[in-house]
Amino acid sequence: MREPETSLPRRFLTAFEVAALLGCHEETVRRAYTCGQLKRQNFGVRSCRFDPVDVEDWIARGAPTRMAGSRHRPSRRVGRRFKSVEGGAHGRPEDLQT
């Protein structure tokens, strides 16, 4: 019986190759393995490769690049926009009118 052919090669892939095959940026692939969504094999100190089976699994899960609940939310400023200084025009736009 013959195995179904996949679009990914049968060798370990670099982050650049995975990004080129998927049509995304290389940083998207790096973000995925940094947060633990995509498994990698380390080769030396600076190099890593990806198994095509792990890449296909990552794609099947929707290619997430963040852990659940770790979405960056900018802080909201609460309070007045301008400080009010008593006895002069030092902050509020109403006090700046002459």
Image (cartoon, rainbow, N blue to C red):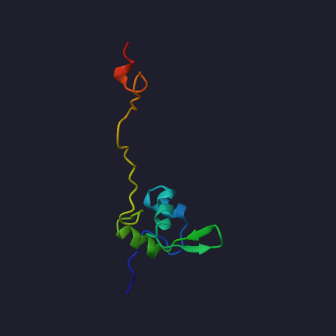
Observer-nearest of 38 and 77: 77
**Residue 20 in the figure: left or right of residue 73:** right
What residue lies at 49% left-to-right and 67% top-to-bottom?
Answer: 33
The residue at the far front in this view is 87
Relative horizontal placement of residue 11, taking residue 81 as reference (left or right): right
Residue nearer the viewer, 88 or 80? 88
Residue 50 locus on image (x, y percent): 52, 71
Percent position of residue 19, x then y: 48, 60
95 lies above or below 47: above
How many marks the image carries: the answer is 0
The percent position of residue 18, horizontal first and vertical second, equals 49, 64
User: Residue 20 or 70: which is nearer the viewer?
Assistant: 70
Give the residue drawn at x 38%, y 53%: 73
In this picture, residue 9 sits left or right of residue 56: right
Q: Quadrant of residue 3?
A: bottom left
Q: Residue furthest right?
A: 44
**In the depicted view, which residue is nearer to us: 61 or 35?**
35
Q: Quadrant of the C terminus?
A: top left
Task: Give residue 67's position: percent from left, percent from top.
Answer: 40, 66
Task: Say which residue appears at 58% left-offset and 70% top-offset.
Answer: 48
Q: Going by the picture, which residue comes out furthest to the top?
A: 98
Q: Residue at x 47, y 58 (%)?
A: 28
Which quadrant of the figure contains the N terminus? bottom left
Q: Quadrant of residue 55?
A: bottom left
